Amino acid sequence: MKFTNGFWLMKQNVEPLFAVEYAGHALDGDTLTVYAVGRHITGRGDCLNVGMLTVTLKSPLENVLHVELTHFAGQCEPRVRPSVREAAPHVTVTEDETALTFQTGTLRAQISKAPSDWRIEYYDGSRHLTGTDYRNMARMRRRDTGESFMVEQLRLDVGETVYGLGERFTPFVKNGQTVENWNEDGGTASEQGYKCIPFYLSSRGYGVLVDTAGEVSFEIASEKVEEVQFSVPGETLGYYLIAGGTPKGTVSRYCALTGLPALPPAWSFGLWLTTSFTTDYDEETTSRFIQGMADRGIPLRVFHFDCYWMRGYHWCDFVWDPDVFPDPPAMLRRYHERGLKLCVWINPYIAQRSHLFQEGMERGFLLRREDGSVWQTDLWQPGMALVDFTNPVAAAWYREKLKALLDMGVDCFKTDFGERVPVRGIRWFDGSHPGDMHNQYTYLYNKAVFDLLETERGKGDAVLFARSAAAGGQQFPAHWGGDCTASYSSMAETLRGGLSLACCGFGFWSHDISGFEQTATPDLYKRWCQFGLLSSHSRLHGSDSYRVPWLFDDEACVVLKEFTELKCRLMPYLYGQAVCAHQTGVPMLRPMFMEFPEDRSCQTLDLQYMLGDTLLAAPVFRADGAAEYYLPKGKWYNLLTGELLKGPGWHQGRFDYHSMPLLAAPGKILAMGNRCDRPDYDFAEGVTLHVTYLEDGEAAETVVPDLHGNPVLTARAARSGNEIRLSVQGGGNWTCGALWEPGATVTRTDDGAVITLKGGGVR
């Protein structure tokens, strides 16, 4: 929300109270309270008829600082906040004549005590991060309505760029944008988002999480172009300043605060095929699709039944439509015998025609209006209501209905929707603020379903396909990018959304291959298959047409098969990166600036990405097969063409449907498996350890996990002259080689191998 008319003037109806001057402090344990008065105080008379902001500082985790500013404490309603972890870190508070200093780890806040010089400067060690000072921290009041808003503005350095704020399809760099933290079902071609996260990540290696589950307005260099402004309605505003040193370190620290992603099962990384949304299908149709994939040798791992596995007007009653699926347990058993995992579509809405509506209404499990009646709407389903997940008994009731499906043979759920949540005239069971619950609802919804899967299937075998999310929702993977269309523009905006979401710690992400709306051309289908199979999770899904490849052309079947098999072979590497995301919060799909923060050319790149720390993927976005992509410093090897390319610099090429820019970074060991028919197998048995380009004196290391994420093979490589010495601990049979030197000779040793390069391996 904008409050100013240019830099000097306020909007006509806005009455500001800015923090102007330090007016004292108090220390209670590890909480520092500082008072900031609204004008310069020259004598006792100035202490009258003046407003004051109360600013508290504390630290839940080392290198994480919580700042809260409050105007009228007696008018602060109980609000819903993101759930965070606290560890009581060591805090120091020091004071001299000019400043107060609050420090946690290497992060410190320095508060000026000078007259008419209210400011807080934030440092990570000796490095200045950002700060708030003149006309920044404030309470704004609208004279016409009496509404209050709390505002903070944090400075941007020259050349500093801002990312994140959830899954955003607008330009990747958020500088110059206004962003509303309000979940909406707006598709990928709008400024709305399904997954709005009040966290932004700076290119300078820090992040800011606004401490509310409710509405937040961000003005990122768009009201004051040298600052990020964020504001919330009410009389208090809190935020966390997170210092990780680097973008990856900051995302990791953010996830330590809000929750690390669970580790999805390896089988979920295989190819998913769905019935699509409004298509006609029955068991004969789904069986024909499954057999068609098998006939063409395309490894299929998960089959998904979308909405119409239930009867229309009954969503959700969790009852199979008997006209098209007369014996669901037998069908699911047959599909399991074919080696498939099975997923079904659900949402948190209960239509009036559903037999669960009366039960939920009578037992008080549905969201109520202020007068006690059930809130209902005809939008989406006739007379539908919402399950009130703030009621623990209602959440248990919902899980009980889903458990019956798990007992029948379903393996996982697509948790669709969760954005269309009312905010006016309603009353939640636990009394939560209606505005706050608009976004927080999806957190409770997905948590309820994920908790059920972990209980029934066990940790490590639980996975969702979720559309909406709130802060902390990364704990319940995986998420997909929502309703895109069948165009190259939409494919690009989908990637932008995934990169923005990755900046908020979402480790596992997917999208509808070839677009949800409309039907792709064969050209686009094949290009999106490449992109889709080089994402953490890969799903063929659409709206009113099927997405099986033979409906596009024969070559589409070949391309889908090749890239599905490639992903299966890459699983020893990919699952190792999944374990990294689970343990550290660093996502699998990474923006280039996150992996290469020292390379300024990477700051704006949004048409390519790193898949883990070793693979660079640049999808082709043109019908003529042309691609332009940037390589950071070093010698990069294209896995599909065999080219060795040098960075830093831009490269161009033209690629057929069986190829694309897929490059292994220098200084790595890329582990590839010996199976291409499924994603879940013994990754260490028969693994090939591909050493990428190493400079003389350079070393690399990789870890190959088992299906539970435990390390079973560790490989280390170091180059000296024209020799690379490889040491391997654990694992089964393995082979190795220098990826950029196919003619290199390999001699096995007791603990590894020696790779001898031809001519020193330099080209």
Image (cartoon, rainbow, N blue to C red):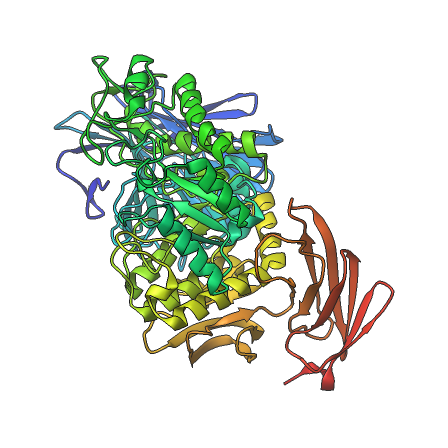
**What residue is drawn where x is 25% and y is 36%?**
312
Q: Is residue 597 above or below residue 643?
A: above
Quadrant of the image occupied by residue 747:
bottom right
- Residue 539 visible from this viewpoint: no
Q: Is residue 500 left or right of residue 2?
A: right
Q: Position of residue 694 (x, y in %)?
A: 68, 72
Instruction: Specify the quadrant that holds the C terminus.
Output: bottom right
Of 710 and 436, nearer the camera is 710
Farthest residue to the right: give it. 750
**What residue is drawn where x is 34% and y is 34%?**
347
Q: Is residue 449 left or right of residue 237?
A: right
Q: Position of residue 530 (x, y in %)?
A: 44, 65
Q: Is residue 249 left or right of residue 310?
A: right
Q: Is residue 81 above or below residue 134?
A: above
Q: Position of residue 484 (x, y in %)?
A: 30, 54
Of 522 and 136, nearer the camera is 522
Q: Is residue 580 above or below residue 441?
A: below
Q: Is residue 420 above or below residue 360?
A: below
Q: Position of residue 19 (x, y in %)?
A: 33, 33
Q: Is residue 285 left or right of residue 92?
A: left
Of 144 and 700, nearer the camera is 700
Quadrant of the image occupied by residue 431:
top left
Instruction: Specify the quadrant that holds the N terminus.
Output: top left
- Residue 482 visible from this viewpoint: yes
Of 431 and 479, nearer the camera is 479
**What residue is drawn where x is 32% and y is 41%?**
324
Quadrant of the image occupied by residue 14:
top left
Across the whole image, how many numbered discs are drawn on residues? 0
